[in-house]
Each structure stands twice: as structure tokens, then as C-alpha cells.
Amino acid sequence: MPAISASAPGKVILFGEHAVVYGQPAIADALLEVEAKAIINPLIQGTPGEIRIQAPSIKLDADLSQLPIDDPLATAVRNVLVELGIKAPPPFKLRVTSTIPVAAGLGSGAAVSVAIIRAVSAFLGQPLKDARVSAIAFEVEKLHHGTPSGIDNTVITYRKPVYFIKGKPPESFPVNESFRLLIADTGILSQTRAVVGEVRAGWEQNKNRYEKIFKSIGEIAEKARELMTSGTGIASYLGTLMDQNQYLLQDLKVSSSELDRLIASAKEAGALGAKLSGAGRGGNIIAVIEEPRRSDIEDALYAAGATGVIATKVFGGSWGPLE
């Protein structure tokens, strides 16, 4: 039997992080420039039910039976077996690799889960539909983030711009006009679970104040969707909305001096607007740019301490529904 492989992209949140956990809308898109990959080969000399999981980047090389109940990679595999009702699958080796920076707000954990779920279900002859892939990946996300919104697994599974409200069916939407982004990494790990927990603690202590901030962030996401769907010359407007979103994230105290420095440097070099993307306190910033200024902005970001810069484009065009 030939090897079976599956891949999944990263993701970038454009608007709405943190507020999305509290019922406000968020917008995200797939980041196709990076990906996680899962490759499965049969174990010719193995016994039924034997599964070897290898992930060189985290120095993992172990049998599934040896991994703890809360190991994310093992959980993704086990959940697929439960979903398909298979107790003793043909023996196989699963190798996982990824070019997505870890703990950087780009969906590394969800992408790995989606790639594994697709590869394992395909190997077992029962490839799962997107809705089930996303649902299983969401369960794994709980190990990474505690109380995830579900936006990472959704946008990574469907590989489309997504307008997302927790607890409601996600919506894809047409983007009327393409625009460009630069994504710059602070090089500092973003501890999503801890940051989300701290925001929750603040919300529990002062719900009125936090609810106002979340509502304002949600209104920005709604305006952004309207612009992206029907606007023209939208880059500068989206940049302004990103600036407004960043002020509110600073008010939530999830930014950091390193993120703020990259944002300021990008704007000084000509970016139309910028904000952190993801949980914050590290990870990445995103900046809306115009192509003629790209090189200058990249240089400024590296000079300000960025450890990596990814250029991407949100493409205009029609999208079908999520199915």
C-alpha cells in the first residue's frame, strides 16, 4: 500500500480574537504559505492496532499505546478511531511535520490535528467530511487552549475566509477585492491557554468593562466583513480598523512591548494599519500593506526585532458555502 498523506494550512485572525470567545464575531483566513503534513505508511511487520507516531520537531517517537490520554497528537488519532468505530486498525506509522511556527498565533496545533485526522481517516478507507474533521479537531483544541472559540479548526479545515461566531454555523463570504498582509513574528512564544485564562479572570472580576471592549471588537469585525464583501479600495479602511482593534486589545492587556514595537515600525515604514494576531503576549503581528512598500516594511520589521516575516494575500473572488 502506498503512503497516504494529508496537509493543512496555518491560519491568521484578521479581526476579533479574544472577543470571539465571548460570542462576538471574528474573521480569519487560511495561511497557505505554511502547512502541517501527516504521512502514513503501513507497518508491514506490525500487529493489528499497532500505531507508531513520529514528530521529529518535538522529538516524539512512540507507540500510540504509550502516549498519555492528553497528548494532542495521540488524541487526534484516537478520536478518529472512535469516530469510525475501529478498535484494531491495520498497523501503521504516522509521521508529522510542520512549517508553521509553534505558539505564534498561526494555528499550528489545529493544523496538525486536521492533517492527522484527514490522513488517518483516508488510510482507513473512510475519509471524513469537512464538518466532522473540524469537529474532531475542535476537541483536540481543548487540550491546547482550554476554552477555544473553534475558529482555528474551522478556518484551517475549510481553507476559506470565515466569519465566525461561537456556537453558530461558520460562514464563508466573498471577498470583493484582494489585499496584502505581512505577518511578523516576535520570536516570543504566545501561551494561548494562559492568556485566554487571564482574560477570563479579568472578565469575571469586571464583566461590564470587558463586555464593552468585546462588543467594540465585534463591531469592528462586522465592519470589516462589510468592507471585504462589497468595498473597493479597502486596504486603507481595513488598516484603520486594525488600528482600532489593536487599541482595544491593548486595553485587554494582551499586547506586549515587542508586539507594539513591531506594529509601530510597520506603520512608520508605510503599513496602512497593524495589530497583533492570535492570543497575544508574543507571537505575530499582521499589517495591511500596499505592494510598493513591501520591501521597506519588511526591512523595518526585521530591524525592529522580527524573527520572521511572511507575505500573504487575501484573495478576492466568490466562495461557496461551508459544507
Image (spheres, rainbow, N blue to C red):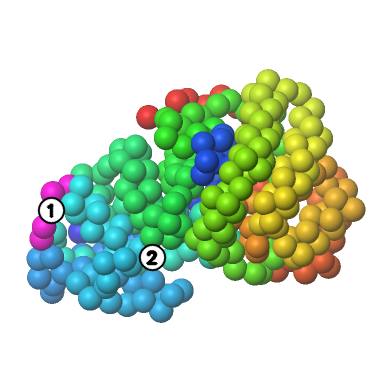
Between the C-alphas of marks 1 and 2, the distance is 22 Å
Is 85 placed above or below 303 here?
above
Mark 2 nearby-residue class (10 Å; few <14, some 14–19, many ≥20):
many
Residue underneath mark 2:
96
Query: Mark 1 against mark 2, which lies toward the viewer?
Result: 1
- Residue 40: x and y, percent? 29, 62
- Residue 34: x and y, percent? 55, 56
- Residue 301: x and y, percent? 80, 61
Q: Residue furthest front?
A: 205
What stretch of residues is rendered in magenta?
84-88
Q: Nearer the viewer, residue 281 or 130?
A: 281
- The answer to whether residue 14 of the structure is visible from this angle is no
Q: Which mark is residue 86?
A: 1
- Residue 130: x and y, percent? 35, 39
Q: Amino acid at mark 2?
A: Val
Q: Quadrant of the C terminus?
A: top left
**Residue at disc 1, secondary structure:** loop
Image quadrant of residue 97?
bottom left
Query: Are the residues flagged by discs 1 and 2 in contact, CB closer than 8 Å?
Result: no
Give the side of residue 296 with respect to residue 172, left or right.
Answer: right
**Residue at disc 2, secondary structure:** strand
Which is nearer the N-term, disc 1 or disc 2?
Answer: 1
